[in-house]
Image (tube, helix red, strand yellow):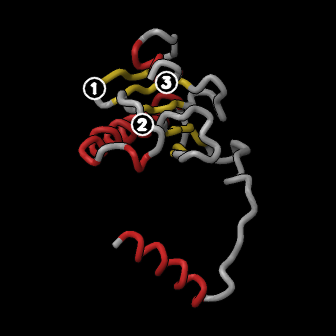
């Protein structure tokens, strides 16, 4: 897609600090990292959200995400990673991308920054689970 910055990175017309470039996708440093070494992993094809990624591409794409998530702690002497995908809401670039963020205990990241809510009771939780299960078939 011509106006997609991530497609430009895939095509090589937009510069990026690439960490991996393989047929399954690319990994490159986020220009606004949560922590230094924050990598974005993108598929080569332009899809906006995870549900749009063809099922045949899932093993390769998530295999690549897994490789990056394994490499980041070793390369950066971190204790682990935070791996996340936004679909539409909070998705700053409309091209599927997976964040792989290095984490170390005491790094100051305190989970998610939105209010948490509890279910009123088990029945309410069961109702939500049933609605989603029904949609899944």
- The disc at residue 47 is 2
- Displayed quadrant of residue 94: top right
- The percent coordinates of residue 9 (x first, y second) are 46, 17
- The percent coordinates of residue 99 (x first, y second) are 53, 38
Asked whether, in this view, residue 74 is left or right of residue 58, the answer is right
Asked whether, in this view, residue 118 is left or right of residue 28, the answer is right
**Between disc 3 and disc 2, whose residue precedes?**
3
Quarter in which the C terminus is drawn: bottom left
- The percent coordinates of residue 53 (x first, y second) are 36, 43
Q: Nearer the viewer, mark 1 or mark 3?
A: 3
Asked whether, in this view, residue 105 is left or right of residue 21, the answer is right
Decide: few, some or many residues near mark 3? Use Cα within 10 Å; few <14, some 14-19, many ≥20: many
Whole-Å distance between the Cαs marked 1 and 2? 16 Å
- The disc at residue 6 is 3
Q: Which residue appears at 46% of the width and 9% of the height?
A: 13
- The disc at residue 23 is 1
């Amino acid at each position: 897609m011509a106006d997609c910055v991530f497609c430009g990175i895939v095509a090589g017309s937009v510069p990026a600090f690439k960490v991996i470039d393989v047929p399954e996708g690319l990994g490159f440093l986020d220009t606004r990292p949560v922590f230094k070494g924050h990598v974005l992993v993108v598929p080569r094809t332009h899809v906006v959200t995870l549900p749009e990624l063809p099922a045949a591409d899932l093993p390769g794409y998530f295999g690549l995400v897994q490789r990056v998530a394994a490499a980041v702690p070793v390369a950066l002497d971190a204790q682990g990673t935070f791996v996340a995908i936004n679909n539409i809401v909070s998705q700053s670039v409309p091209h599927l991308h997976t964040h792989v963020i290095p984490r170390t205990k005491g790094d100051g990241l305190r989970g998610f920054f939105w209010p948490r809510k509890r279910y009123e009771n088990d029945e309410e939780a069961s109702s939500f689970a049933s609605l989603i299960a029904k949609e899944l078939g």
